[in-house]
Amino acid sequence: MKQDSSEYYLAEIGMVSREWGLRGELLLKLFDFEIAELDSIDRIIFGADHEKFGKLCSVRQHKGQALVKIEGIDSPEDAKKLRGAKVSAYVNEKPALPEGVYLYSQIIGLEAKDPDGTVLGKVVDIIRTGSNDVYVVDDDKGQELLVPAIKDVVRQIDLEKRLIVVAMQEIAE
């Protein structure tokens, strides 16, 4: 794959959940990608600063997550160092999304505020429930707020300002 070509763009595809087994394999929680889509990727990049990368040697499914083997990560100790790291890859097509539809990688990391401007925390995860997604907001004090991704609750998503406005009282009434 020509990863420096203008046809490709760097996409955050998930994060390392944890290490697996004795060969240094990694379990990945994928955001906007399906496990089968990893077949078209030959390298993945780790960390927010893209400080480590490796050739993708194998991919298989394990309990709904991608179990991957990366060249150069050969022991549980090597793999453990990557736990929690963001995973990116060069992909060849930027998805065209309808208005109001976002990639998981666009939502994770947004600052959540209520309509009055009170900071609630940051979106750290998204739970797929089938009927609607649920945004997990961490308030930096160890408390998590579960925000249903429905129009009555999620009032605004501003990717430029890295902000999501949520009205939690609407579901409490």
Image (spheres, helix red, strand yellow):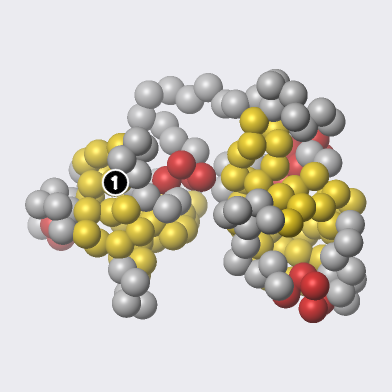
User: Is residue 112 found left or right of 95 in the rendered image?
Assistant: left
16 and 126: which one is in front?
Answer: 16
**Residue drawn at 39 percent across, 60 percent down:** 136
Q: Position of residue 107 (x, y in %)?
A: 42, 46
User: Is residue 150 found left or right of 53 in the rendered image?
Assistant: left
Which residue is the site of mark 1? 164
**Residue drawn at 34 percent across, 44 percent down:** 162
Q: Eyeballing the image, is 167 above or below 36?
A: below
Using the rendered view, name the quadrant where residue 122 is placed.
bottom left
43 and 104: which one is in front?
Answer: 43
Total residue callouts? 1
Q: Position of residue 102 (x, y in %)?
A: 44, 35
Q: Position of residue 11 (x, y in %)?
A: 61, 39
Crowdedness of circle 1 by 10 Å Cα count: few (<14), some, many (20+)?
Answer: many
Please say whether residue 8 is visible from this viewpoint. yes
Q: Eyeballing the image, is 121 above or below 35?
A: below
Task: Quadrant for the N terminus, please.
Answer: top right
134 and 144: which one is in front?
Answer: 144
Q: Position of residue 110 (x, y in %)?
A: 37, 50
User: Is residue 160 found left or right of 22 in the rendered image?
Assistant: left
Q: Eyeballing the image, is 119 above or below 35?
A: below
Label 1, secondary structure: give it. Answer: strand
Please say whether residue 36 is visible from this viewpoint. no
Task: Quadrant for the C terminus, please.
Answer: bottom left
Q: Eyeballing the image, is 3 above or below 123?
A: above
158 and 172: which one is in front?
Answer: 158
**Residue drawn at 16 percent across, 58 percent down:** 118
Q: As shown in the figure, which amino acid type bears the numbered disc 1?
A: Ile
**Residue drawn at 76 percent across, 52 percent down:** 53
